Amino acid sequence: MFTISKEFHFSAAHRLLNLAEDHPCYRLHGHNYIVTIELKSEQVSDNGFVVDFRDLAPLKEYIDGTFDHQYLNDVFGGLATTSEHLAKHFYDWSKQKWSKVSAVRVSETAKTWAEYRP
């Protein structure tokens, strides 16, 4: 099995409104997010790729245009803007474009991440 991954970065603010008011994540705060997409395949293309990294540019455009320097509560409406929900969202969006997507990981800090892998 061949596995590739690529990182995408964005900065955004959010609040986790479903938490108690004294929880630090209830308050408005921001992160420098890292989104990592993973793709797997039993075989590579004639060019030797699972997917050409350049072909992942639409994900960068989507992230930059929709999420970068945004208030995520506005972007997601009523959905809690946790890393878990972000990972699932980016997985679903990416899977529609590339069938070989196997997982998406979202990191809010250098020490934390959430991953969605069906």
Image (spheres, rainbow, N blue to C red):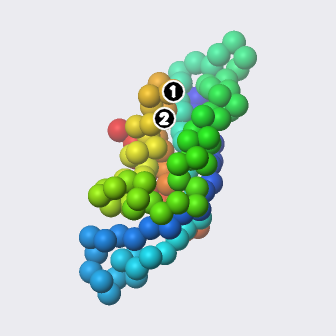
Q: Amino acid at mark 2?
A: Ser
Query: Is residue 83 visible from the viewing direction of this image?
Result: no
Q: Farthest residue in the bottom direction?
A: 22
Q: Farthest residue in the top direction?
A: 46
Quarter of the image for the C terminus: give it: top left
- Around disc 1, counting alpha carbons within 10 Å, would you say few (fewer than 14), some (14 to 19), or many (20 or more)? few
Q: Position of residue 105 (x, y in %)?
A: 49, 50
- Around disc 2, counting alpha carbons within 10 Å, would you say few (fewer than 14), some (14 to 19), or many (20 or more)? many
Give the structural element (helix, strand or loop) at label 2. Answer: helix
Give residue 11's quadrant in the image: bottom right
Q: Amino acid at mark 1?
A: Trp
Query: Is residue 20 visible from the viewing direction of this image?
Result: yes
Spatial CA span between label 2 and label 1: 6 Å
Read off the residue under disc 1: 98
Read off the residue under disc 2: 94
Q: Position of residue 65 (x, y in %)?
A: 58, 47
What residue is at 28 percent from the left and 75 percent from the top? 19
88 lies left or right of 99: left
Say if mark 2 contacts mark 1, CB within 8 Å: yes
13 over 54 or under it: above or below? below
Of residues 104 and 73, the one nearer the viewer is 73
What residue is at 68 percent from the left and 32 percent from the top? 53
84 lies left or right of 7: left
45 over 70 or under it: above or below? above
What residue is at 65 percent from the left and 16 percent from the top? 45
